[in-house]
Image (cartoon, grey):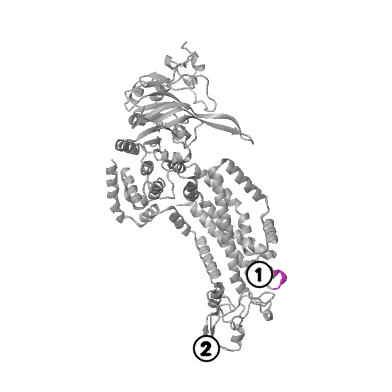
Amino acid sequence: MSDILVEVNGLKKYFPIKKGVFSKTIGNVKAVDDVTFKIKKGETLGLVGESGCGKTTVGRTILRLIEPTAGEVIFDGKNITKMDTKELKQYRKQMQIIFQDPYSSLNPRITVGGMLTEILKFHEIAEGAAAEKKVEDLLEKVGLRKIHARRYPHEFSGGQRQRIGVARALSVEPKFIVCDEPVSALDVSIQSQIINLLQDLQKEFGITYLFISHDLSVVEHISDRVCVMYLGQLVEVADSKELYANPKHPYTQALLSAVPIPDPKNKSKRIILSGDVPSPANVPTGCYFHPRCPKVFADCSVIHPELAGTGGHEQSCLLFPESYPKDVKAA
Amino acid sequence: MTEKDTIEKESLAPESNGLTKAQLESQKQVGASYWSLVKHQFKKNKLAIISLYIVAILVLMALSADFLASSKPLYAVYKGETYFPVIKDYLNNLGISKWDPELININWKSLDNENKLESVLWTPVPYGSTEVDLANSLSPPQGDHYLGTDGIGRDLLAGLIHGSRVSLSVGFIAAGIALVIGILLGSMAGYFGGKVDIVIMRFVEIMVTFPTFFLIITIVAIYGSSILYIMAAIGFTSWTSDAKLIRGEVLKVRNMEYITAANSIGLPHRQIIFRHVIPNAIAPVLVSGAFAIASAILVEASLSFLGFGVSATTVTWGSLLNEARGASSAWWLAIFPGFMIFIAVVTYNLIGEGLRDALDPRLRD
């Protein structure tokens, strides 16, 4: 088991809906509802799903930027959900995050060098002239020049800002980086630069990534394994190649059919889902996906499927007998 | 790929020599920090720049009040000895040197009138602010009394010059106290939210319900009228709007991803608030700070006018204005102090407006 870096067990994050003078809780938004997965050392795990399905919340809960409601996150053998602030500080060095919006993720009042030096000093990595040298190294590593250290964020383009975001994450020499849609705000040409940069850094430092995105082709390119999320739950987990070649869950099939294929002769059948995503504050009974599923049948509205499968390909769909909960037998 | 990127940028650099002036200007803006952009924008506002100069003049006047108006000469030669009585007064007050016992209560003016001084240089206004000249009471602007005198013969111009000290320091210190309290409480309420926010904001609401002016009068009535009490009273009652303003800004800044990034680094809350939150939320509060200086000057003048201000021996613009109440024919007692208060209040308001415009990115061309 020592090749597992991050283990997420039954992670839940409910945001309470409060109302009235005394802030009575009248319900919960189930942003993340019982999510379990593992990330191996040095791999890239893709996490895909449409807007609002809880991808970002999963990423931030793992880093404890959001306190989880239930469940645990085991990082390198240590349960970080139970750590106090002091213990957590040591682990902050090992886990970092790269943000989606390169414009709001950099403090406009601090120079790039100032920001990096602050981090190096706080984590006692380097100080003074050594810190200056380290900042230069970091900037060069992400494809910027050392004179950029004296500049303010607004003097950079979106792609350059994202490189600075990568440099910030790298500054503490982490083992694990959550990439929270790091390229979705960038031009396609810049996207590939950043993706290549992330891959180069992975090769050089052996960093493990959790790559969150709604762009299926980007995820296919960078990920070793992929998790598909729907309404705060994982619906399918498989190796990247396997998932794209042989999607099992109807939701994954619908998602993949929406990816454009650059071949005018290829007329693949597009699966159009009816209806909207249900509110995570009021989820459907049974399988969360059943109101929109093209292959729905009687059991779907009653029985909640479990994530199960063979050969590293797991899905939670009642079309597959292994997904029936253990106490309920397939009809 | 990254190497190619760097090379491309480097090859672009030498071309900047052939740019037009406008392009260079815009490049200068790109290469500038946020505050130098604000400075650039502020300079375009003529009224605000003029106001800034007027404030600078007022501050200089307040600092050099003793050299502008004093009952003692700047330089005098008496019995073959050279004296610098104004400077000597300063050193004496600081305890660095002592007046000779025979010179300590000497009346330099009568010595001058009796032609006992071999050589003398008076200050531009040859009267101190508290120097009583009963023979010339309620004199209109004439002779040595450039702006006239009040009911007990104190020179009005000397009073205005020395009064600027009180007015300006009350403005700066009261607004400073209000800003510090407002920024600390407001940013805490906005950053931590939840219970901290509820407690602080209810406290703000309680403070808002007090009639400020009445509260200040009560404080002065209980603790006596010292300039320190007045500055503190104005400062401790006028921070609420600053707190509300910065809370709103902090709520906006708190959700920026660079704050989440600072959290993910593990920085302590104190460092995040002071280094990342406040610098990004402070701009609109500085604007209100400029207005707060103006209103503090006005409050002090009002208090002095009503007689609740600083003690009777200290001259302020408000207390001079108060003199005009008892002498309705002495127009100079109403016009000149009123004009000084007007100038100070208007310049600070114009500076505040200039700052507000310069800080607003939507007004930037």
Look at the image and give the residue range highlighted in magenta: B324-329
What kind of residue is marked 1?
Leu
Q: Which residue does the numbered mark 2 point to in the structure image?
A: B80
Looking at the rendered structure, the secondary structure element under dot 1 is: helix
Residue B349: image location, x then y, percent: 57, 59
Badge 2 and badge 1 in a common chain: yes
Query: Which one is in front, A246 or A76?
Result: A76
What kind of residue is marked 2?
Gly
Q: In this view, does B234 lie to the left or right of A35?
A: right
Query: Which one is in front, B243 or B7?
Result: B243
- Is residue A98 in view from this perspective? no
Vertical placement of residue B301 versus A86, above or below: below
Q: Which residue lies furthest to the top in this view?
A: A331
- Is residue A316 in view from this perspective? yes
* Residue B91: in magenta span: no
Q: Mark 1 lies on which chain?
A: B
Give me the disc on residue A232.
none
Residue B110: image location, x then y, percent: 62, 85
Looking at the rendered structure, the secondary structure element under dot 2 is: loop
Q: In this view, does A89 lie to the left or right of A193?
A: right
| Quadrant into which the N terminus of chain B falls | top left
* Location of residue B338 by image quarter: bottom right
* Location of residue A317 by image quarter: top left
Give me the disc on residue B320.
1
Query: Which one is in front, A10 or A149?
Result: A10
Seen at 63% across and 58% down, the residue is B233
